[in-house]
Image (cartoon, coloured by chain):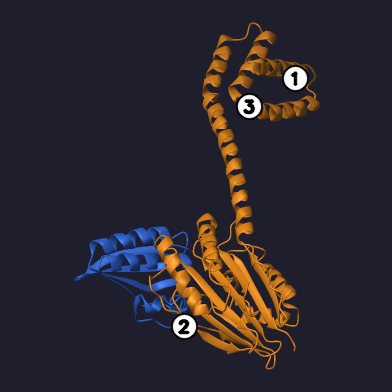
Chain colours: A orange, B blue
Amino acid sequence: MEQTKKVVSVYRELLQEYLRSKDEKVLYQAEQFSRQSIQDGVKPEEIIDAHYQTMSEIIPDMDPRLKDSFKFLIETMIYYGVAYGMFNDIKEQQYSLRNEIDVAANMQNTLLKTEIPASEVLDIGAISVPARQMSGDYYHFVQDTEDNIGVAVADVSGKGIPAAFVMSMIKYAMESYPDNRIYPEMILELLNRVVERNVEPGMFVSMFYGLYEVEQHKFYFATAGHEPGFIYRHRSKTFEEIRGKGLLLGVQKDSDYKRFELDIEPNDIIFLLTDGVTECKVSGRFIEQEEVLDVLYNYVHEPPEKLVENVYKHLERLQDFHLRDDFTLVAIQRKDN
Amino acid sequence: MNLHIDDHNEGQSSILKLSGEIDAYTAPRLKEHLLNLIEDNQEVQVDMQQVNYMDSTGLGVFISALKTSKEANKTFKLVNLQENVYRLFNITGLNEVIDIENTVRGGM
């Protein structure tokens, strides 16, 4: 009530001042006043009432029809005030929701953090950029007791919070496996059971799992319905597709996965990715595989860490900086020795 | 883009004819329609000839359909897939667990 009185008196002064001077400056002050009133939660009908009161002081013998018309106008404005109050409530709710999502996204980053292992024989680069706040993409590295390096790249169907939950589940399942050499197809079989039991029907995860064996320079891998990767052969300067075969995680209780292997030569680069890379849309059409490889080829001379960064920037530019899907790219290069 | 959904019966089985794109916007409607159809019929065939684009949300719909039909001991199959749509089923290994017939070449 105190507030309303103050509003009425400020409004009265401004209106009187304007009627006297017709000064543009006062109009500007009125603008400021309305901004302040909105902040203070003054309702529209209160302003009209202030207008009415001021005018009846200035023109005591105001035409009764005009007087009634103000009453009418005030009634008409009441729901605008209510709607405005609701808008404020929603604004507040949205603000607190956004805070919650920020907290969740931060937690996701902390929970899913993975260190890129330092290796005598490999250089590794990895980048993962969410299209929205929370990512459904994931990569993970492990190094076993013999210094072999395991790498997982995964994409959970759907996005946002449900996908993030599933990702955390997978990460913790993976971390509970022993540290000694464990082959990709075994990991996928174990994970499939975890995912199948714990996600709703229709939700699924694609995952590529690779194990780089550092003595013989063999790359063992298995895929659970994941986008094929590529290997860049340094000697021939050409790309080969890293194609395996295996069912998505979470579709069927007992899925068998097959182990594939590749021999890696010095300076060869293994590229693992998610469909955010291959399904990038350039001027209304999807990019062709050759175009993706052309982009990769532009940067193969760079160290993997910079390479993935630059490929991302390049594809982001091609899509006018509008990422449609989470983007993940991992590059693993055998050192020149 | 939009997805047009149309169904009719041919003898014992129900045919669901789709045309357009299956993505996050059209998938929920398709899912509801398809799961109802499986509930009411012994055999459901989805004709995909006019589907020129599908993303992973579409895969989710067909995985749900697969699980539902298996549980209820019913037949569910996809027919006439365009090549780019079939590619997704192939990469994900779903072509080995979902009954898929008559892939048509080419697209658009």
Residue A167 visible (yes or no): yes
Looking at this view, is B7 or B101 the one in front?
B101
The crowd level at tag 2 (other Cα within 10 Å; few <14, some 14-19, many 20+) is some
Instruction: Please tell me whether residue A63 is drawn above or below residue B108 in the rendered image.
Output: above
Q: Earlier in the sequence, mark 3 or mark 1?
A: 1
Chain letter of the residue beneath label 2 in the structure image? A
Corner quadrant of residue A15: top right
Residue A106 rendering spot, x and y as whole percentages? 64, 53
The amino acid type found where label 3 is placed reads Gly
Q: Is residue A35 left or right of residue A140?
A: right
Is disc 3 placed on a helix, strand or loop?
loop
Q: Which residue is mark 3?
A: A41
The residue depicted at 69 percent of the width and 28 percent of the height is: A34
Dots 1 and 2 on the same chain:
yes
Marks 2 and 3 share the same chain: yes
Vertically, is B31 above or below A249? above
Coordinates of residue A79 in the picture (x, y in percent): 52, 27
Residue A145 position in % (x across, y down) = 63, 77
Q: Label 2's element?
A: loop
What's the chain of the residue with tag 3? A
Q: Amino acid at mark 1?
A: Leu
Instruction: Say the numbered circle drawn on residue A206.
Output: none
Q: Residues within 10 Å of mark 3 (few under 14, many from 20)?
A: some
- Residues under numbered marks 1 and 2 in contact, where contact means CB atoms less than 8 Å apart: no
In this picture, is A326 found above or below A234?
above
Q: Is A315 or B2 nearer to us in this picture?
A: A315
Distance from disc 1 to disc 2, alpha carbons, whole Å, reads 81 Å
Marks 1 and 2: which is nearer the front? 2
Disc 1 target residue: A14
Which residue type carries mark 2? Lys
Looking at the image, which is closer to me, A252 or A62? A252
